[in-house]
Image: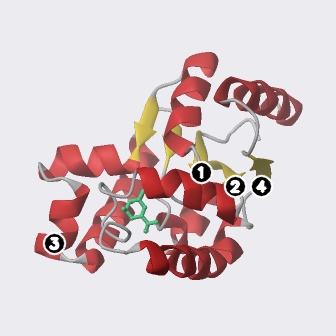
Amino acid sequence: MKDQKHIFLIGFMGSGKSTVGKLLAERLELPFLDSDNAIQEKTGKSINEIFNQDGEAAFRAYELDFLNELQSTEKSVVAVGGGLPAIDSALELMHQMGLVIYLNTSLLTLIKRLKEEKEMRPLLKDLNDSEFHPFVEALLSERVQFYKQAKLIMPNERNSPIELVDKLEKELNKLII
Ligand code: S3P
């Protein structure tokens, strides 16, 4: 465990990875990285623009590049996009580079949160009310098999982000990172 580097937060869109990741990084005095932000900075495009102009496959390639580049960066807390763990070989790479934590949030909570913030998410922004629930449900059930391969599974439901960070800090101390 001591050799492990990064702390990865994985989970579905809307599971709180960025909010919790920032706070956890502050608590552990580590840098915070977010794959979506890094890709936007590198390409000079928003995630919506990348999907529209270059296509989803190009976005997934950027995500994999982001992950590969972490091999030569200092230890950080890293929040990754909800689809990244489903890319072939990505989870294996994350396990090699650090500790993978799944923020597990229920379907209904995700739907409630995501309906309010769907505009910035290309996979969701064009769905109407009747399409929204079945789409999120199907994508989540496809992705759960990847998320569940995390070393630590932390529910993120009714707690505040700070409460979750307290819990995570305790779990990490047990693992003596
Ligand atoms: C995606 C999740 C998003 C972003 C992109 C695709 C996905 O990140 O990478 O819109 O496929 O689940 P968040 O999980 O941070 O919303």
Q: Earlier in the sequence, mark 3 or mark 4?
A: 3
Question: Circle 3 — which element?
Answer: helix
Whether pointer 1 and pointer 3 mark residues with C-beta atoms closer than 8 Å, the reply is no
Give the residue drawn at x 41%, y 43%: 34
Residue under pointer 1 = 15
Q: Earlier in the sequence, mark 2 or mark 4?
A: 2
Give the residue drawn at x 70%, y 28%: 165
The kind of residue tagged 1 is Ser
Is ligand 1 closer than 8 angstroms to the Cβ of mark 1?
A: yes
Q: Quadrant of the N terminus?
A: top right
Q: Depth-wise, is mark 3 or mark 4 nearer the camera? A: 3
Q: Earlier in the sequence, mark 2 or mark 1?
A: 1
Residue under pointer 4 = 151
Q: Is residue 76 visible?
A: no
Whether pointer 3 and pointer 4 mark residues with C-beta atoms closer than 8 Å, the reply is no
Question: Circle 4 — which element?
Answer: loop
Density class for disc 4 (Cα within 10 Å; few <14, some 14-19, many ≥20) is few
From this viewpoint, which residue is outermost toward the right? 174
Residue under pointer 3 = 52
Q: Depth-wise, is mark 1 or mark 4 nearer the camera? A: 1
Side of 49 where 91 appears, left or right: right
